[in-house]
Amino acid sequence: MDSPHKPRSFSPNLFFFFLLVSSNLLTFLISNTFKHSSCYLYQQTYNSIDTDSSLNTDIPLVVQPAETRDDDIQASDLDLPSELRAFASPHKLPFGFSTNFDSDSIIPPVGHPCTRFPDLLRRYMSYRVNGSCPDDEILGQKLLLKGCEPLPRRRCRPAAQQEYVEPYPLPESLWTTPSDSSVVWTAYTCKTYECLINRVKSQKSFDDCKDCFDLNGREKKRWLSTKGAGLDFSIDEVLAVKKPGTIRIGLDIGGGVATFAVRMRERNITILTTSMNLNGPFNTFIASRGVIPLYISISQRLPFFDNTLDIVHSMHVLSNWIPSTLLHFLFFDIYRVLRPGGLFWLDHFFCVREQFEQVYAPLIESIGFTKVKWVIGRKLDRGPELNEMYLSALLEKPLKNSW
Ligand SMILES: *[C@@H]1O[C@H](CO)[C@@H](O)[C@H](O)[C@H]1NC(C)=O
Ligand SMILES: *[C@@H]1O[C@H](CO)[C@@H](O)[C@H](O)[C@H]1NC(C)=O
């Protein structure tokens, strides 16, 4: 216990790591000091991080110095939770060398920052094999948003409802609030859908997508109106850009409660919706509606092959709170997964006007899309003196020579 490698001696390293890895965390915290009215599906996480301080510190941890740290999980990392080592260490293939893997073993993936948060990781990987997992959604999401993405697999059964109520049948499920008994509520302030629907009126504090769970409110009208147009493109006007029926599959990044996917489904188009569960059961709700939630952050490489999707949409989420280098990678990833002729609908991107001219317009224009629509407008909800603006753009990946 009193070895020279006790954790304390490396805390400067850890701290440095923490700064490096989570430079985006800083951005979140800074941007979090503003009150946004929009669906802002990422920032709020760090509120919950600060409030959860019950770290398990009983177990002595030996943390290697940064310089020598190997991001592979090695059998020699005896300080790591045994279930993490059981999962993420190299596993010998039963039939020896495989040309597909170009190896005689498999190393299952976890996000490389995982081991930088040994306390959280130890808690996450502490469970009885073949038993029930802890009811620890907040912990898992916290690790994931710190960069431990993908999370390690676990050999336990996730917390589930005592009396699960099956979803409404389609198409009723698309616009019906599901039963409260379809959700494990532990992680959220609200414990019922009624509370989520009423929180716009009853709750002062900021929440992502605060009014989204009310399917009879603003959700009902999104992307339908064509009058006035401006920044609000309608789905039908966007689809009209392409030959009928050629937009079939796609992705909505940070899509709230997936109303975009629901509207597209009504047009026989399949959309997957990425979302976190920031103080609300977004993934469960999306699934209850009968469309597909993808539980990945905006940092993760999109899990699609090159040149495959017909459309990628994102509203309010891709904006100036994302560090611009990460945004650059993200836009290229969107370009990658779109097929030639595919559409990228950047819906209400926002920033300050000078940033737009100096950083974001050149950045977006540099990716290689063709502009189909490009509308800018002022963003006034926080006051005109802030000089904020929106961009709504419809961009097309060139059909020829997109490489
Ligand atoms: C695993 O758990 C299941 C359900 O509790 C139980 O029926 C089964 O016997 C367990 N298997 C082992 C090998 O312990
Ligand atoms: C969707 O597909 C169904 C079944 O093929 C068809 O009956 C319906 O008209 C289609 N709806 C639209 C909006 O294309």
Image (cartoon, helix red, strand yellow):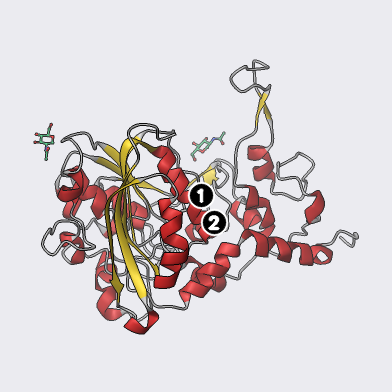
Task: Estimate the x, y position of residue 186 in percent, counting from the top left.
Answer: 42, 63
Q: Is 390 in front, or is 139?
A: 390
Residue 43 lies left or right of residue 259; in this view the side is: right
Label 1 residue SS: helix
Q: How far apart are marks 1 and 2 (CA)?
A: 6 Å
Residue 110 lies left or right of residue 329; in this view the side is: right
Q: Identify the residue at image location x=45%, y=68%.
A: 355
Residue 248: quadrant of the picture: top left
Q: In this view, does 212 lie above or below 153?
A: below
User: Where on the image, by quarter, is ligand 2?
Assistant: top left
Residue 167 seen by the camera: no
* The label number, if any, that marks residue 325 in the structure image: 2
Q: In this view, does 172 lie above or below 209?
A: above
Q: Is 28 in front, or is 258?
A: 28
- For the N terminus, which image quadrant? bottom right
Residue 153 lies left or right of residue 178; in this view the side is: right
Residue 187 seen by the camera: yes
Q: Identify the residue at image location x=80%, y=53%.
A: 67
